[in-house]
Amino acid sequence: MRHVPRLARLTGNDGYGTVVRDDVQAVAGTLASLSGPFGASLALAVREHIDPSPHVVVAGKDAAALAGAARSLSVAGRTVLVVEDVEDAGVPKEARALARAAGKRPMAVVCVGRACRAASTPDELTVAAR
């Protein structure tokens, strides 16, 4: 349950978001009374749904510096996807337009929910991930 919101972002399948919304509505008002692994997992899923962790997409050839910077980010829960082609299946649609604009240059795109910011240097990436 905890990883379902992240799965929605990584796959682009909005159906996973529906699962989280339905589950949250089903236990609304009772979350505080849940205990054990189920309650903790559900609480983390709710947090991820409400306050999503950054998803970083590094695209392009010769993007080793950006990929290293993305992996080194000290941002809790962030995921990093490194691809040569921005049209790869795991790239969120919101990130594709920004990455396409870079042309052949390496580009990192940081998405939090559906809001994305582009970065072309490790320093810009650090700022975009905050």
Image (spheres, grey):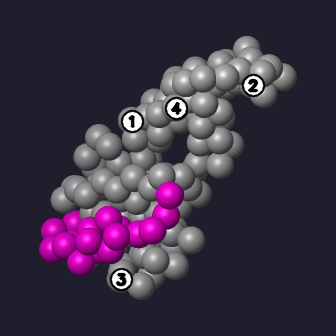
Q: Position of residue 80 (x, y in %)?
A: 34, 56
Give the magenta part as a residue range.
60-76
Task: Using the numbered discs, state the Cα–Cα distance from disc 2 to disc 4 in whole angstroms.
Answer: 14 Å
Image quarter for residue 68? bottom left
| Sequence-first disc among 1 and 2 | 1
Q: Are marks 3 and 2 in contact (CB under 8 Å)?
A: no
The secondary element bearing badge 1 is classed as: helix
Q: Residue 121: give its label.
A: 3
Residue 31 tag number:
2
> In the displayed structure, does residue 44 sit left or right of residue 28?
left
Q: Mark 4 Cα within 10 Å, few/some/many (few <14, many 20+)?
A: some
Q: Which residue is mark 1?
A: 11
Amino acid at pointer 1: Thr
Under mark 3, the amino acid is: Thr
Q: Amino acid at mark 2?
A: Leu
Where residue 14 appears, x then y in whole percent?
52, 30
| Residue 111 visible somewhere in the drawing | no
* Residue at x 53%, y 52% (from the top left corner): 53
Q: Residue furthest top?
A: 26
From the viewer's perspective, is 12 left or right of 127? left
Residue 35: percent from left, percent from top: 67, 23
For the C terminus, the quadrant is bottom right
**In this figure, which residue is indicated by the disc labeled 4?**
2
Whether pointer 1 and pointer 2 mark residues with C-beta atoms closer than 8 Å, the reply is: no
